[in-house]
Image (spheres, helix red, strand yellow):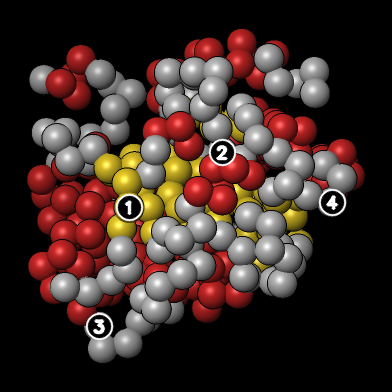
Amino acid sequence: MRTIRNRHDNAVWWWQQARVRRAIEAAFAAPTPLALEERLALEGDWPDADDPRPVVMAACDEGYFERFGQHLALSSAARSPGTRIHLNVYAPSADCRAAIAALKARCGGRLTVSIEGLERNPFAEPKSFYYAAGRFAVASRMRREIAAPILMVDADGLVANDLAAGFAGLSEVEAAFILQPDNDALYRRILASAIYLGTTGERTAEFFTRLSDGIGLALAQGGEYHVDQIGIHYALEWCRANGWGPRIDDLDLAWSDYEFRPASLIWSTKGARKGRYEELLASVETL
């Protein structure tokens, strides 16, 4: 009944949850990581491996790039000059590639953009189910290849304030998720709109590789429902049961604020909140 009342809240039903759980358990119980991100075929550019400045990372298709992703990048460059932004764009057209080049010029060297085809896509087109789950492989590769901390966010957010102090406060954190353990729905106990991939901890990189593997296995089944949040839930559950993994911290909602408070770091317009996006954008685009 809750889902009927809130159609924007993408439900993951019990039989779908079972599929995701099996995929996650297969990935975490494997003797060695499957490392599915090694199969990624990316064009474009990549964050400099030795640059210590933190990276905000998001993924989108062409439609989301035009409506949201470019503004996320511009707001980051304008309001957080000490950090970097990376977008992974799926199957952009020639016109979109030209827009990407122009956007990079406007961001003054703080934006990198990787481009991916549809080889991993189980759907006929890059639906939101695809790039919400597919971004984990990109983030996992990035965690292994660059020295800086990473914050993976949804493309439909806006940087509201300078992120430098917030990242400094996370310097000793291994991994962090926005945890909502009291939520009745399992697929709502984790908010995947902001995920921190730290630089400390012996198991941090492997954890995110195995998480990427599990979500990738679930994604490949082609089910038209989001597998990212429920996948994280089962990954953390497996780690607790098996005494394995990095230390998991609770990430403050200021990193993905859906109430749009002025002091927050990133505003998230997930779901029905997209109706306020243009209003929020007007408050940052003058920069």
Q: Is residue 273 visible?
A: yes
Q: Say if 182 sits above or below 196 in the image.
A: above
| Residue at image mark 2 | 155
| Residue at image mark 3 | 30
- Sequence-first disc among 4 and 1: 4
Q: Say if 123 sits above or below 157 in the image.
A: below
Q: Are marks 3 and 1 in contact (CB under 8 Å)?
A: no
- Horizontal side of 284 relative to 277 (left or right) equals right
Residue at 70% x, 14% y is 282
**Residue 204 location, quadrant:** bottom left
Q: CA distance from mark 2 to mark 1?
A: 23 Å
The type of residue carrying mark 2 is: Ala
| Residue at image mark 1 | 249
- Horizontal side of 89 relative to 16 (left or right) equals right
Q: Pointer 3: residues within 10 angstroms few (<14), some, or many (20+)?
A: few
> Split into 4 quadrants, where in the image is the N terminus?
top left
Instruction: Out of 142 and 264, give the one closest to the viewer.
Output: 264
Q: CA distance from mark 2 to mark 3?
A: 32 Å
| Residue at image mark 4 | 109
- Sequence-first disc among 3 and 1: 3
Residue at 72% x, 32% y is 79
Q: Are marks 2 and 1 in contact (CB under 8 Å)?
A: no
> Split into 4 quadrants, where in the image is the C terminus?
top right
- Sequence-first disc among 4 and 3: 3
Residue 220 position within the rendered picture, expressed as x and y whole percent measured from the top left? 36, 62
- Sequence-first disc among 4 and 2: 4
